[in-house]
Image (cartoon, rainbow, N blue to C red):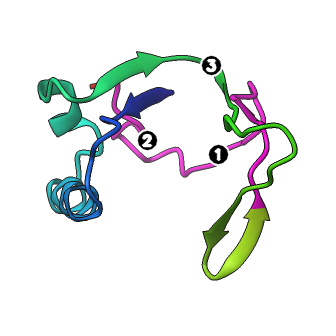
Amino acid sequence: MEISIGPDNLTKTDFIKEGWRRQGENQPHRGAKSDERFKIFTSGEFTLSPELPEGQENWFSIDMEQFEAMPIKVKLKKDIINVFHRQSTTEPALSSS
């Protein structure tokens, strides 16, 4: 998987503009690769660990639901999803470009 890390000082407006730009171009990392503010990594797994002072809790919200900020490990698992298609399909399902 490709991981794109943006700058620490990205404003909310810039974040939203970047998301709309990527959505409109249907190229999630295209701009990030040419933008020096973004770092691109390729990895099979990564861990996000919030840096909080000891004894302090922090929360984030997804769709108005609160989640405690804690370390999260994301890992690709081989052969977890099986995809079936008709034999007459001539186009590959995924492009390597």
Do the residues under discs 1 and 2 have CB atoms within 8 angstroms?
yes
Q: Nearer the viewer, residue 72 or 49?
A: 49
Q: Which labelled disc corresponds to residue 83?
A: 1
Residue 20 figure quarter: bottom left
Q: CA distance from mark 2 to mark 3?
A: 21 Å
Give left or right: position of 27 versus 59.
Answer: left
Amino acid at dot 1: Val
Look at the image and give the residue range highlighted in magenta. 68-96
Q: Secondary structure at mark 3?
A: loop
At label 3, counting other C-alpha atoms closer than 10 Å, the crowd grade (few under 14, some 14-19, many 20 or more) is few
Q: Which labelled disc corresponds to residue 44?
A: 3
Q: Residue under circle 2?
A: 93
Residue ID at (68%, 38%):
50
Give left or right: position of 35 versus 61.
Answer: left
Q: Nearer the viewer, residue 48 or 75?
A: 48
Give left or right: position of 3 versus 27.
Answer: right
Q: CA distance from mark 3 to mark 1?
A: 20 Å
List x then y, in percent, for residue 53: 74, 38
